[in-house]
Image: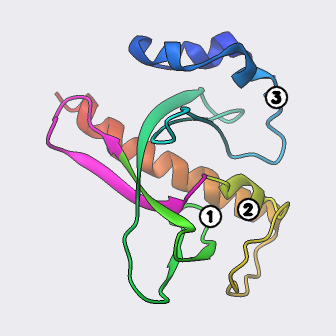
Amino acid sequence: MIQRDDILGTVEKKYRKLFSANDFVDLATQDRAFLKWIHKSGSVIHVSFGWPDSELRTFRLKRSATKSSGLRKFMCEWCKTIHDRGGIATFVAPSKVERSTKFGAHLCRNLECNQFAAELDRPRSVQMGETLGKEEKLSRLRHSVDDLYRKVSSLANSQ
């Protein structure tokens, strides 16, 4: 099982103060592709993932509202859940090396991707039919999280 110190060891020092002891009450990882911590401001999120297949990694995202007019629907890039307006937000992962470079993704507003992929919750919007089972959806979600992490870290590791 993942421990509090394991996770804090992967977080940049200046952001460790954002975590409280209560943030680590439930570290059970069954049916989860990642763990998340949303700062009380709602705009900064830390995502930890990578167990048990590889090393634990954590990266930071900043959330902003996705602006849209009309009745458009949006699909989460991680879990492929379709949401009505307001159910998706734009998340940006800043580069540690190149200040002007940022990687963005449209994701479930509260990063509830684990619940949707594990079929523990259903969104309000009509979904496209899928033939994937729960384990395959969680595997796809793990891969999607890892993909964004690799994009962000590849720039940081290239210099």
Q: Quadrant of the N terminus?
A: top right
Image: magenta residue range: 93-110
The residue labelled by disc 3 is 26
Question: What's under tag 1, amino acid-wise?
Answer: Cys
Q: Residues within 10 Å of mark 3 (few under 14, many from 20)?
A: few
What is the CA distance from the residue labelled 1 to the residue labelled 3? 22 Å
Give the image location of residue 4, x and y in percent.
Answer: 70, 15
Q: Quadrant of the C terminus?
A: top left
- Residue 17 visible to the viewer: yes
Give the image location of residue 61, x and y in percent.
Answer: 43, 41
Tag 1 and tag 2, C-beta contact below 8 Å? yes
Give the image location of residue 64, x and y in percent.
Answer: 39, 53
The residue labelled by disc 2 is 117
The residue labelled by disc 1 is 79
Tell which circle, 1 or 3, labels the residue nearer the N-terminal end.
3
Secondary element at image label 3: loop
Question: What's under tag 2, amino acid-wise?
Answer: Ala
What is the CA distance from the residue labelled 1 to the residue labelled 2? 6 Å
* Front-lying residue, 99 or 123: 123
Q: Name the side, left or right, on which 141 lies relative to 43.
A: right
